[in-house]
Image (cartoon, coloured by chain):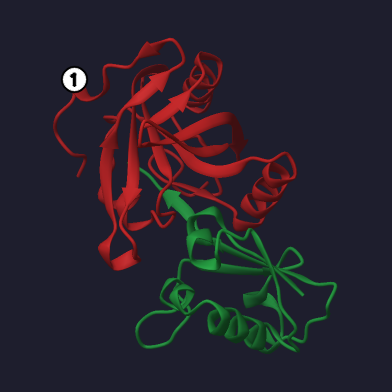
Amino acid sequence: MLRISQQVYDAIRQHGEETWPHECCGVLLGRFTTDSGAMINDVEEAIRAGNTRTDSAHNRYNIAPRELVGIQRSGRNRGLEVVGFYHSHPDHPALWSPTDFAEAHWLGCSYVITAVEKGSARQTNSFLLTGDTEERKAFEYERIEVTGQLEPGLETESEPVS
Amino acid sequence: MKIEIPTTLRAYTGNQAVVTIQAATVAEALNRLTGLYPEFKKHLHTPDGKLRSFVNLYLNDQDIRYLPGREETQVRDSDTLSIIPSIAGGG
């Protein structure tokens, strides 16, 4: 499960609205915790990152590794870990695409996707990258707990993006 | 030198975020790291021994792919090597 404050949740959705019709992307810093035996990726901060895919920013994103090194180091200095990433799907559903899966390598981290339709944030979903190796990885839908409320998740969308 | 381990691979280094290694080159540092933590190797290399394409290595904020010596680049105790898997995608 992904746990996130309303403020941070709103911030990542707003980021997607600001960059529409291009994809936004960023890093989620926080802590890996457990609650009654359940694993929780507990988000403290969302750090905006630049999308280096200027050649196809409407349907691709990439965070420069050097920027990621800096974000990771900055978080570690404050006791925070990289627990996930977020990006937007301009005018596409908030479901992982084959490209999202192929390019996902941070096992145990959450990948949050917000569908942004004509500049307005719609559905936000989170997918946990499970598995113990690159060859056995899988995306699993996970619940998002926004502090004080539960998000409805996949109720409004059902088809994978192709 | 210090090797920074990403969150996703820390389970294979005894949950250590930073591992200190004595080595003369980047390649030697990686060999010693995987010698200390054998389970780490399969996350760094493909089954045929090549560095996985999505694994980036930064020596003091410089991508080693753009250093003349690449993995054979000489290192000092004060250097930091960051192992950072790529993050990309899109719908």
Q: Name the residue under label 1.
A: A155
Q: Identify the residue at horizontal 36%, vertical 88% (top origin).
A: B48
Is B76 left or right of A83, judged from the image as shown?
right
* Total numbered circles: 1
Label 1 chain ID = A
Q: Can residue A27 be seen in this view?
A: no
Q: Residue at x 37, y 44 (%)?
A: B90
Q: Depth check: give the residue in front, A33 or A15.
A: A33
In the figure, the red chain has which letter?
A: A
- Can you say whether A84 is above or below B2 in the image? above
| Residue drawn at 26 percent across, 29 percent down | A93
- Front residue of this view, candidates B48 and A121: B48
Label 1 SS: helix
Is B84 left, or right, of B51 in this rendering? right
Q: Classify B8 as above or below A51.
A: below
In the image, is A98 to the left or to the right of A28?
left
Q: How crowded is mark 1: few (under 14 residues within 10 Å), some or many (20 or more)?
A: few
Residue B22 lies, in percent from the top left, at 75, 83
Locate residue B72, reporting x and y percent.
68, 89
Regarding residue A154, the answer to whether it shows in the image is yes
In the rendered image, residue A22, in percent from the top left (x then y), is placed at: 46, 34
**Chain shown in green:** B
A157 w.r.t. A80: above or below: above
